[in-house]
Image (cartoon, rainbow, N blue to C red):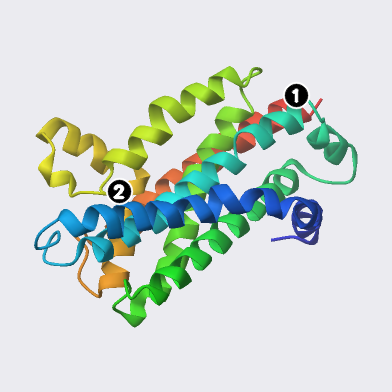
């Protein structure tokens, strides 16, 4: 990580100091209300819990990972498109002595900061509700940061390709929302048909959910830890490469 990358990160951080209040609802309050509505409300009607644990304890780690997904996708979509198409921030940064990797890396670093901050706040509240049962829960934070990068990097690549925000609405409607509902956040994917089950396994979110659930409950994940991390790293690395190619094509003349 270079000083130039940190300078770009600082730019986004300074801007966030003036706008952070507008992100509280989407990145913290709504997940908290979802936890109360599903974990406490619906959970009261789930006799015996799920997988041998109370429903609140089961759904909380899924919501931590899902919050990371939502924040990463949100911060990597309209802001990236806006910096290319509307505000031209990226072009101004590229005109300074900054490399493409600095422009991309600094913004991605800010997105990961937002992911970590939201997940940490949510995890703290979940701990106060008694839904965390292992000291390994702290390991959920680096997991959601990796999950955030696995989501943000490909979305950066997509957002730097399009010219209309209508394509971003399609992204959320047909990818982000179904992933949030059917990747093991609210119920085991094993309860779905085999075909849909493997679709869920292919999503980055399911791997993040399984690791977070293992961390907060103090149990072994369904897949190997190395396998989960390698799969998320594959998405992160591939997304970074695609985003860098797209950024370079648009910013280097």
Check the image and report above or below for 142 versus 172.
below
Q: Which of marks 1 and 2 is nearer the N terminus?
A: 1
Check the image and report above or below for 73 versus 33.
above
20 or 100, which is in the foreground? Answer: 20
Q: In which quarter of the image is residue 41?
A: bottom left
The label on residue 206 is 2
* Label 2 crowd (10 A; few <14 / some 14-19 / many >=20): many
- Secondary structure under tag 2 reads helix
Q: Mark 1 points at which residue?
A: 85
Locate residue 46 relative to residue 107 in the image: left or right.
Answer: left
Picture residue at 74% right of the left edge, 41% below the top: 100
Q: From the top left corner, tell me how far across and down residue 61 is, in percent.
A: 34, 61
Q: From the top left corner, tell me how far across and down residue 74 is, in percent.
A: 57, 40
Locate residue 111 relative to residue 250 in the image: left or right.
Answer: left
Check the image and report above or below for 82 versus 24.
above
* Label 1 crowd (10 A; few <14 / some 14-19 / many >=20): some
């Amino acid at each position: 990580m270079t000083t130039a990358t940190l300078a770009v990160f600082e730019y986004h951080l300074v801007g966030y100091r003036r706008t952070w209040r507008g992100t509280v609802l989407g990145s913290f309050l709504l997940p908290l209300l979802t936890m109360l509505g599903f974990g406490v409300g619906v959970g009261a009607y789930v006799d015996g819990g799920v997988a041998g644990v109370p429903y609140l304890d089961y759904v909380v780690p899924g919501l931590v990972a899902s919050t990371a997904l939502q924040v990463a996708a949100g911060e990597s979509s309209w802001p990236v498109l806006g910096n290319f198409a509307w505000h031209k921030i990226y072009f101004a940064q590229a005109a300074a002595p900054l490399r493409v990797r600095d422009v991309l890396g600094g913004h991605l670093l800010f997105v990961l900061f937002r992911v970590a901050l939201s997940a940490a706040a949510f995890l703290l509240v979940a701990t106060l509700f008694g839904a965390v049962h292992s000291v390994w829960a702290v390991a959920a934070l680096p997991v959601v940061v990796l999950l955030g990068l696995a989501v943000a990097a490909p979305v950066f690549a997509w957002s730097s390709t399009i010219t209309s925000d209508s394509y971003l609405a399609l992204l959320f409607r047909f990818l982000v929302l179904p992933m949030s509902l059917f990747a093991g956040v609210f119920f085991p994917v094993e309860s779905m048909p085999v075909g849909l089950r493997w679709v869920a396994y292919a999503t980055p979110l399911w791997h993040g959910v399984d690791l977070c659930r293992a961390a907060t409950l103090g149990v072994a994940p369904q897949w190997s830890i190395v396998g989960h991390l390698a799969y998320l790293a594959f998405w992160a690395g591939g997304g970074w490469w695609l985003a860098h190619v797209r950024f370079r094509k648009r910013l280097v003349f």
